[in-house]
Image (cartoon, grey):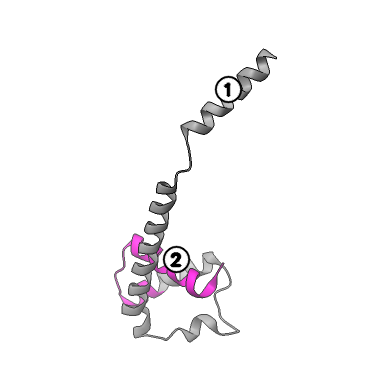
Amino acid sequence: MRKLYLTLLLSASMSMANPSTPNSDTNQSLALSEQLEEGKDLHNDSCTKCHDSSVYTKEDRKIKNLDALNKRVEVCNTNTGAGLEEEELKDLTLFLNTQYYKF
C-alpha cells in the first residue's frame, strides 16, 4: 500500500512540475502564426518572381514529400540568388507545406 501511495504522489508531483498552460499554447500559436506570415511574405516577394502558385497544385507536381520540398526550396534559393537565411527557408517551407502540400 505504501508503494502505491508513493507512486501516486510521485506521479502527481511530476505532472504538476510541467503543466501545459494555456499561456504556453497561446505563445506557440502566436509563434507559428508569425512564422506562417513571414513565410507567406517571403513567398510573395521571392517565389512569385519565377512562378505562380499553380506549380504547387498540379496533379503531376514534382514534390512528393517534405524532404523533397525542403530540397526544392533550397535549390530555388540558390538558383535565384534570393539569399534567404536558414530561418527564412524554414518559414517559407512551413508556409508552402501548410498552404499547399500538407505533408
Q: Mark 1, mark 2: which one is toward the viewer?
A: 1
The disc label shown at residue 94, or none: 2
Left or right: 37, with 17 as reference point: left
Q: Secondary structure at mark 1?
A: helix
The residue depicted at 57 percent of the width and 23 percent of the height is 10
Magenta segment: 76-103
Left or right of residue 36, residue 101 in this image: right
Q: Report the front residue among 5 and 35.
A: 5
User: Where does the C terminus fall, quadrant-wise?
Assistant: bottom right
Q: Is residue 23 above or below residue 66?
A: above
Q: Give the residue type that dot 2 points to.
A: Leu
Q: Amino acid at mark 1?
A: Leu
Q: Residue 1: which quarter of the image?
A: top right
Residue extending farthest top:
2
Question: In this picture, is 49 found above or below 15?
Answer: below
Which circle marks residue 9 in the picture? 1
